[in-house]
Amino acid sequence: SDIRKKLLDAFAEADGGFLSGQALANLIGCSRTAVWKHIEGLREEGFVVQAVKRKGYRIAETPTALTGDDIRLGLKTRFIGQSIFYRETVDSTQKVALLLSQDKAPEGTLVVADEQTAGRGRMDRKWHSPKGTGIWMSLLLRPNIPPQKAPQLTLLAAVAVATAIEEAAGITPEIKWPNDLLVEGKKITGILTELQAESDRIHSVIIGIGMNVNQKIGDFPEELKDIATSVAMETGSEASRSKIIREFCAQFEKLYLMYLEKGFYPIKLLWESYAKGIGGRMRARTYNGVIEGRALGITDDGVLEIEGDGGKVHLIYSADIDFPLS
Ligand code: BTX
């Protein structure tokens, strides 16, 4: 609610310091009883709120489990993540976001779940989303751009995720075109962009992000052990999922506003600085067959260019990429 949000903003501003009940009531514009009720609500969510006579309240500890309010605590964006829809378990956050988008949810709405029972990747592949370990989220956007430019948003999201992991955890992932983030060749994040559009107009774009954060090797099923990794496996210590989500929201908003104002070019430059495999040989498995050759880079529209052995340059809009090739 609005009161809850203002309360969290006030605590974030106080940065672990005390705020009196009266000061909170004045700041928020509600009664002290309402403040007290919301503080009880925070406690039920797992926040440790200390109350000291004549000093007031302070947040001593945030919950270990992921909660919507924990994500909100200290989120400094204008609209990305300002409306958070958190659930412990969903089938897929993509599905929930689609329903919310049809229900007129505002741009920037973020659906976050602690667990997905039917998380999905591209082409109906499965996305392993076990409870309590990763970030499974979907972001709702309503950009005023032609539908064919929507894939640029996948690349933009990849840059935002890479930067967020860098800022929050101190490791630098590489981006594999178009939608994988890798560390030492292993997948740490996957991105799935889904579009609802007419021929010339976008209704909504839903960007799904699955990030492995606190899994240990034993948490992955056999078939993923050699190809997947997590933030904790790379850094050796557990990371705060809510902090990474806030960092992502801040990075995404900055890049998205820049994109809407200046177009794709600045995003392209950032994307290239994280990209892996450009300049080397790649194999692209597309709907229409396999193309092999040297990856030249991406166009200003985010399309991958591969120069075949005959010298012909192929434009790749959608494919699975293999490299390095042996
Ligand atoms: P993708 O099709 O590029 O990758 C899917 C493939 O990745 C799977 O076939 C499997 O080999 C591998 N994989 C599955 N789970 C994991 C995992 N946890 N870590 C590493 N590798 C894995 C990538 O699709 C896009 C994934 C988007 C997931 C998000 S989660 C929030 C949102 N909701 C939803 O249902 N999907 C998105």
Image (cartoon, rainbow, N blue to C red):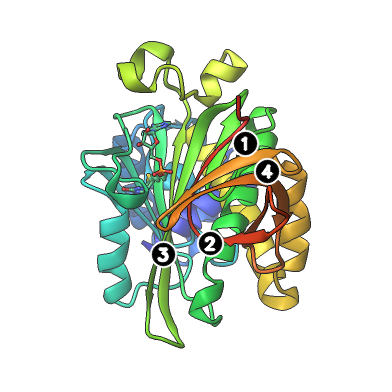
Residue 50 at x, y percent in the picture: 46, 30
Question: Do the residues under discs 1 and 4 have CB atoms within 8 angstroms?
Answer: yes
For image coordinates 39% across by 53% down, the residue present is 35
3D distance between C-alphas at marks 1 and 4: 5 Å
Q: Earlier in the sequence, mark 3 or mark 4?
A: 3
Horizontally, residue 273 falls left or right of residue 281, namely right
Number of numbered markers:
4
Q: Quadrant of ligand 1?
A: top left
| Label 3 element class | helix
- Closest to the observer, 243 or 318: 318
Residue 245 at x, y percent in the picture: 52, 44
Residue 92 at x, y percent in the picture: 26, 49
- Which quadrant of the figure has residue 18? top right
Observer-side mark, 3 or 1, equals 1
Image mark for residue 317: 2
3D distance between C-alphas at marks 3 and 1: 29 Å
Which residue is label 3 attached to? 2
3D distance between C-alphas at marks 3 and 2: 42 Å
Q: Is residue 204 visible?
A: yes
Q: Quadrant of the C terminus?
A: top right
Image mark for residue 163: 4
Please state which amino acid type lies under the numbered disc 4: Thr
Which residue is label 1 attached to? 165
Please state which amino acid type lies under the numbered disc 1: Ile
Observer-side mark, 3 or 4, equals 4
Observer-side mark, 3 or 2, equals 2
Q: Quadrant of the N terminus?
A: bottom left
Residue 96 at x, y percent in the picture: 26, 58
Observer-side mark, 2 or 4, equals 2
- Closest to the observer, 21 or 109: 109
